[in-house]
Image: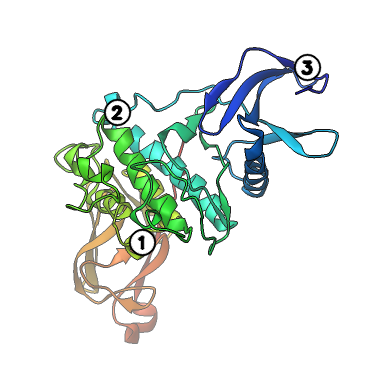
Amino acid sequence: MKLPDRYKTLSGPMAGGFGSVIPLQDAFLRRVVLLKVMQDKANNAQLQNEIRGLSKARSRHVVEIYDVLQDKNSDITGIIIERLRGRDFSTFHEQAASNPHDFLKVLYQVATALKDIHAVGIIHRDLKLDNFKESSSGVVKLFDFGISSPGGGYQTKENKGTLVYAAPELHVAGATITPEMDIYAFGACAWALASPKFPPVLKEMPPQQSAACPSISAVMPTYPSHADGLHAEVVTLIDACLNPNPKARPTAETLSNVLGRHLVRNRHRGLFIQGKFKVVELSAGKPPVNLKIGGLGEITVVYDGLIFLVKQVSGSVRINNVPVAPGDVLHQACLLSFGDSSLGSGQQWVTFFASHPEVVL
């Protein structure tokens, strides 16, 4: 293949799957990029999938496409993509159990990539440990969209997929490709990140014929026995990804939202403001807040690391004019009123605001 003059080959091709990648120096933009070509020209149609997937999926967590190479007949012969210079995750399992927060952070970024591509109708179809990597700035990015499918309803003829990562429903003739297949692969990725060995039931064809997959808690520490361990909600969510029933799996949006929420566990701050001057803070380092206003009402609020929860209440206390009961959650911004509404101006009010910490990658 003749390259445009701006590109200079740096080393030989690195084979993988159906394609090969070749490091190039982009002399015009002065950066190293990757050229992806198919090992068999008969598979060049897969490059169309790559172009469609990468150009449609605008996401911080999807590798960028820079250029498309064509021959004299205008047929696509290769694509130029971003070079990811950060770590891969082939040995991540060695640190996973000792660093559950980092484990969660990687999964959150992969889930966000899936959320973004599913939102525009792209199904990756080959999500696995080998197909995501960190950029030089430490952002996890998904790549290799060679067998991706646009939208739902596509029926595969060749059932391409990777053992262990391929969902049970892919092991039938003429399987219909769905986003739930990516979610199953996400669950397998969680196991690959956490352990050097997959549970034997995931290696069956189709998987999980003899028994259900063990819980991820079998190889990862959990909260509260481990301060930074996986919360029960996270464990349940990851386990659900590998449910043999596609309808029982969570969506990528749910995965991204829940994992992101747990990444900022214990980082919220709640402020109770009474009048112009009295301010009471509730956070991970502060004890539960007890608010008692005369004989009008009393409320105790605790912070469990994720939400601000009403623990006890007595008298007449309302949140946004709705009576409060133990177990209710204080929303990000709300008004607490003390005293029956019949008191009119005799009531007392406390405003509550909760911070919304961002996930820092």
- Give the residue at x 28% y 49%: 207
Looking at this rendering, what residue extends furthest in the bottom direction? 342
Across and down, in percent, residue 161 comes to 44, 44
| CA–CA distance in space, label 1 to label 2 | 27 Å
Answer with left or right where residue 35 lies relative to residue 243. Answer: right
Quarter of the image for the N terminus: give it. top right
Position of residue 81 relative to residue 243, above or below, is above
Residue beneath label 2, please?
93
Mark 1 belongs to which amino acid?
Pro
Looking at this rendering, what residue extends furthest in the top direction? 10
The reply to whether residue 86 is in sight is yes
Disc 2 packing (10 Å; few <14; some 14–19; many ≥20): many
Across and down, in percent, residue 187 comes to 34, 46
Residue beneath label 3, please?
27
Return the disc, 1 or 2, that comes first in the chain's sequence.
2
Across and down, in percent, residue 76 comes to 74, 38
Position of residue 120 relative to residue 216, above or below, is below
- Give the residue at x 48% y 34%: 132
Across and down, in percent, residue 57 comes to 61, 48
Q: Which mark is residue 246?
A: 1
- Give the residue at x 65% y 30%: 37
